Amino acid sequence: MTKINALQKFNKYDTHIRHLQTVYLDSHGFEFEDIAEWTGYAVTTIQSYIYKFRDLLDEAKKIFYHITLKVKQEYYAGKQYVYLFKFYEKYHGVISKVGMTTQLPEQRLKQEIKYYRDHGLDIEDAKICSVIDCGEIPADGAESATRAHFIRKYPKAFKKNDRFFGVDVSVRTFNAIVNNYLNE
């Protein structure tokens, strides 16, 4: 059987394929917004289809190429990185943090968790969502571009030090902003 790419748009009349695509992308951790963009369904439809068609996941795994979201990347201390971390807190839900570092991302994440706990937040989980090497361009610029975009989009959720409380920032949007900035 020839496998197909789940990261493409299918004809609106290919409803069965789009149902398979919905459950497949959800099983790989894609955000509802991203699944909606590829399938053409509304986010609320995605949420109900994930439940309604969950029994199609085995079939979906047979027809789509395997997707690996977390590509193992080597990081080196001293390089310019911009990142998106997400923290999951007992009372505030998700907290998205954009930032820059020259440290290893895992080390920076541990510092952020300590910072939150020292400030009374009950962090239950944390995730490195995206880390982009800025090369010769100082990471300050890419960080500022993402911060400006998300402040405009979520002004009430913004807290000092580039944190957005209660906002699940789109990884895809973050990556697009950084890549656009770096490639201008």
Image (tube, helix red, strand yellow):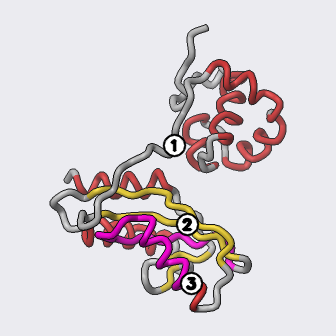
Q: Secondary structure at mark 3?
A: helix
Q: Earlier in the sequence, mark 3 or mark 1?
A: 1
The residue labelled by disc 3 is 116
Q: Residues within 10 Å of mark 2 (few under 14, many from 20)?
A: many
Q: Secondary structure at mark 2?
A: strand
Do the residues bearing badges 1 and 2 touch, measured as CB atoms within 8 Å? no
Amino acid carrying label 1: it is Leu
Residue 132 placed where, x, y %? 34, 56
Real-space Cα separation, disc 3 to disc 1, in angstroms = 27 Å
Please state, as top left, top right, bottom left or bottom right, where the N terminus lies in the image. top right
The tag on residue 69 is 1
Residue at 55% across / 66% down in the picture?
Answer: 86
Residue 100 sits inside the magenta stretch: yes
Q: Secondary structure at mark 1?
A: loop
As drawn, the residue found furthest toward the top would be 1
Residue 65 placed where, x, y %? 55, 24
Residue at 64% across / 91% down in the picture?
Answer: 120
Q: Earlier in the sequence, mark 3 or mark 2?
A: 2
Q: Residues within 10 Å of mark 1 (few under 14, many from 20)?
A: few
Residue 110 placed where, x, y %? 50, 74
Residue 144 placed where, x, y %? 31, 72
Q: Quadrant of residue 160?
A: bottom left
Q: Quadrant of residue 79?
A: bottom left
The residue labelled by disc 2 is 86
